[in-house]
Amino acid sequence: MSRALPKYNKRRVLMIGGTAAVVLSGAVIAGNALAGETSKNSTNATTKAATSPGTVNCPAVAPSLPAIPASAQAEVTRNLTLLDTQIAEANKRLVDTVGQGGPNFVQNAILGPLKDKRVATINRIATAIGRTAAKPTGLDSLAPCTLNANGVNSGGAAATAAPSATATQQAGNTGNTGNTGNTGSTTAAGTITCPDVASKLPAIPASAQAEVTRNLTLLNTQITEANTRLANTVGQGGPNFVQNAILGPLADKRKSTIDRIAISIGRTAAKPTGLDSLATCTLNK
């Protein structure tokens, strides 16, 4: 025969049952929260691991060269090594500047300047060979490089995405926040000033006049192009953008052009020296 529980026993049973229900509900909620957090963290980790800034891919120059005269071998080797160094520097810059600039940042600040440097270096290789053999032509087509991209830049560049080491920084850099552009250039681009070359030249032999004139004109064209680029890229990159993306490549191009002027004069007269000091330009803001 069953006996009814005393009232105080029923109350204890109800209280215990209620506590159990609360504990159980809390466990379910906590479990769901943890599961959601784990899933979210896992997704974020996977996304970060999958991103990469990509690498620069440039055509090989050495296989396209003709037989190299012994007198040019050292200079050619030095410039071929420099081509490799330029690619390594560009790849490093890809990593260091993830999240900077707008949709054209990688092209304007890395691939474009790299191409200019490669043009100057490849021209030096061709000139070195051409001093004692037939000068190779068409090598300029090997100057442009492309990007092997493994991700998508949050700033919209068709080029890069944050590597895992900088994923947090990239996530907080949407729209290039905090990087208002080239310091001091938000209101005016300024102008580029370069040393005059023509006034530093000796008497120009008649046989070199046409080539010297053509290269002096090219020097002016290079300054005009640099000033145009300066105006078109206001607000892009960090504090060193103008130096790295405009003034540096301009100096490389000017050095190559000035070298051609000196070489053309030196074919039939004393080759002028010290002209390389005229290659570097400055920014007037």
Image: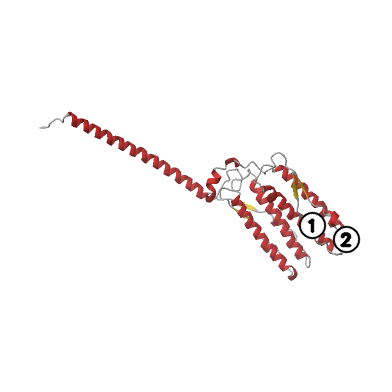
Which residue is found at the position 73% from the left and 57% from the top? 120
What is the quadrant of the N terminus in the image? Answer: top left
Q: Nearer the viewer, residue 103 or 191?
A: 191
Q: How far apart are marks 1 and 2 (CA)?
A: 17 Å
Describe residue 236's horizontal placement relative to residue 224 as left or right.
left
| Residue 258: quadrant of the picture | bottom right
Which element carries disc 2, helix, strand or loop?
helix
Residue 189 on image: x %, y %:
72, 42
| Residue with the most extreme top position | 7
Which element carries disc 1, helix, strand or loop?
helix
Amino acid type shown at disc 1: Ile
Q: Nearer the viewer, residue 121 or 237?
A: 237
| Residue 156: quadrant of the picture | top right
**Residue 79 shows in the view:** yes
What is the quadrant of the C terminus in the image? Answer: top right
- Please count the marks in the image: 2
Coloured how? secondary structure
Which residue is found at the position 18% from the left and 28% from the top? 7
Instruction: Work out whether 133 lies above or below 216.
Output: below
Which residue is found at the position 29% from the left and 35% from the top? 21
**Residue 66 shows in the view:** no
- Residue linked to disc 2: 207
- Residue linked to disc 1: 258
Q: Nearer the viewer, residue 137 or 212?
A: 212
Describe residue 211's horizontal placement relative to residue 283 as left or right.
right
Dot 2 crowding, Cα within 10 Å, few <14, some 14–19, many 20+: few
Instruction: Work out whether 27 lies above or below 6.
Output: below
Amino acid type shown at disc 2: Ser
Query: Is tag 1's residue or tag 2's residue first in the polypeptide sequence?
Result: 2
Residue 212 on image: x %, y %:
84, 56
Dot 1 crowding, Cα within 10 Å, few <14, some 14–19, many 20+: many
Camera-near label (1 vs 2) is 1
